[in-house]
Amino acid sequence: MENGKKIVRPRNGRKIAGVCQAFANFFGLDVSLIRIVWLLLILFAGTGLLAYLICWIVIPEEA
């Protein structure tokens, strides 16, 4: 990464584990948009829940 940004789960502003908030902060998008996309992945693709759990484990929490 050239700009030095790292994806981390924030301690504040999260609903469950902070995964959606982490992606929103990293990509500079609105967290509501990320949550809607993730919900659609869970409902229609069936892979969203597994991906969320993996991200919860892999993405470090903010220090």
Image (cartoon, rainbow, N blue to C red):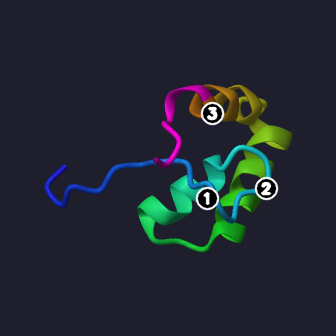
The residue that disc 1 covers is 21
Between the C-alphas of marks 2 and 1, the distance is 8 Å
Residue 25 left/right relative to 49: left
Q: Residue 51 appears at what percent x and percent y?
A: 64, 31
Specify the amino acid type for callout 3.
Trp
Q: CA distance from mark 1 to mark 3?
A: 11 Å
Q: Is residue 41 above or below residue 49?
A: below
Place residue 24 in its image quadrant. Answer: bottom right
Q: Mark 2 belongs to which amino acid?
A: Lys
Indicate left or right for 56 with 50 as reference: left
Q: Please, what secondary structure does the residue beneath circle 1 have? A: helix
Crowding at dot 2, Cα within 10 Å, few <14 / some 14-19 / many 20+, comes out as few
Q: Residue at coordinates 76% horizontally, 32% vertically from top-left?
A: 49
Residue at the (68%, 35%) spot, across then down? 52
Residue designated by label 2: 15
Q: Would you say the residues marked 2 and 1 are in contact, meaning their CB atoms lie under 8 Å apart?
A: yes
